[in-house]
Amino acid sequence: MQLASRLSLLVVVICAGVAPLRGQDRSAAAYNERRQAMVDLIERRGVRDSATLSAMRVLPRHEFVPASQRSRAYGDYPLPIGHGQTISQPYIVAYMTEILQPKPGMKLLEIGTGSGYQAAVLAQIGCEVYSVEIFEALATSARQRFDRLALAVTSRHGDGHHGWSDAAPFDAVIVTAAAGYIPPALVAQLKPGGRMVIPVGSVYGVQNLILVEKDPDGNIRTRNLLPVRFVPMLSGIR
């Protein structure tokens, strides 16, 4: 074989092995790289729960934000999702998840479905998740997202102050909007030995993330975790 022919064949073989990424492939690779960087940052900030970190390394957060925000999906800050609501900062999602000490098979109630990302993290861990959203449009879009991504989340449109009595009791409860007080129904629906994490305070003042623990005898203990900023927990349905 002549030298020119051998070189041509070599070029063909090399190019076949390193075909450039195209379109969606390039986007997927870029999103994956940003997602890993996001979780690395969360881990450096002190979140250590391996199940939480693993779930967030897998879930495509860009699927849970509006198309106009996808380039910012893996930044460590909240993003608007419409109706005056936000998808929480990734670090706060990870921190609140870790506080619940989630394990496969745990039954959890989420108040404030929003885009569905927090519920998705818990479902990815293997928890049985029930989620309530006050805005019908957000509840509908989150349900479609869960179905499209094959995430096992049971969700509905409703007022989160009432919890989900038909599915109670729960091993844990997570609230993703700031309440003016800890709703009694949510405490009542928490199993003895269970935990709830909830932001409490005014949208115009100080909010604190509170850990609520119910001991085996049903006694309640609360503890302040850190100052936070969440949208308000609304009443009624929208």
Image: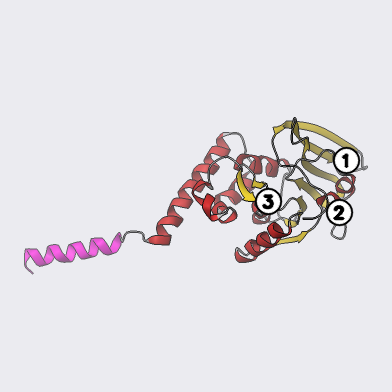
Q: Secondary structure at mark 3?
A: loop
Look at discs 1 and 2 and give the one toward the viewer.
2
Q: Amino acid at mark 1?
A: Asp
Labelled pair 1, 2 in contact (Cβ < 8 Å): no
The 10 Å Cα crowd at callout 3, few under 14, some 14 to 19, many 20 or more, is: few
**Membership of 4 in magenta stretch:** yes
Q: Residue at x 69, y 53 (%)?
A: 119
Determine the residue located farthest toward the bottom in the rendered image.
1
Nearer to me, 56 or 106:
56
Labelled pair 3, 2 in contact (Cβ < 8 Å): no
Q: Residue at x 43, y 61 (%)?
A: 24
Q: Could you tell whether 145 is left or right of 175 in the image?
A: left
The span from disc 3 to disc 2 (Cα, nearest Å) is: 30 Å
Q: Amino acid at mark 3?
A: His
The span from disc 1 to disc 3 (Cα, nearest Å) is: 37 Å
N-terminal-most mark, 1 or 3? 3
Label 2, on which residue? 169
Q: Secondary structure at mark 1?
A: loop
The 10 Å Cα crowd at callout 1, few under 14, some 14 to 19, many 20 or more, is: some
Q: What number is the disc on residue 30?
A: none
Q: Could you tell whether 100 is left or right of 186 in the image?
A: left
Label 1, on which residue? 215
Label 3, on which residue? 83
Nearer to me, 170 or 160:
160
In which quadrant will I find the C terminus?
A: bottom right
Q: Which residues are magenta?
A: 1-18
**Percent x, y for residue 190?**
85, 48
The 10 Å Cα crowd at callout 2, few under 14, some 14 to 19, many 20 or more, is: many
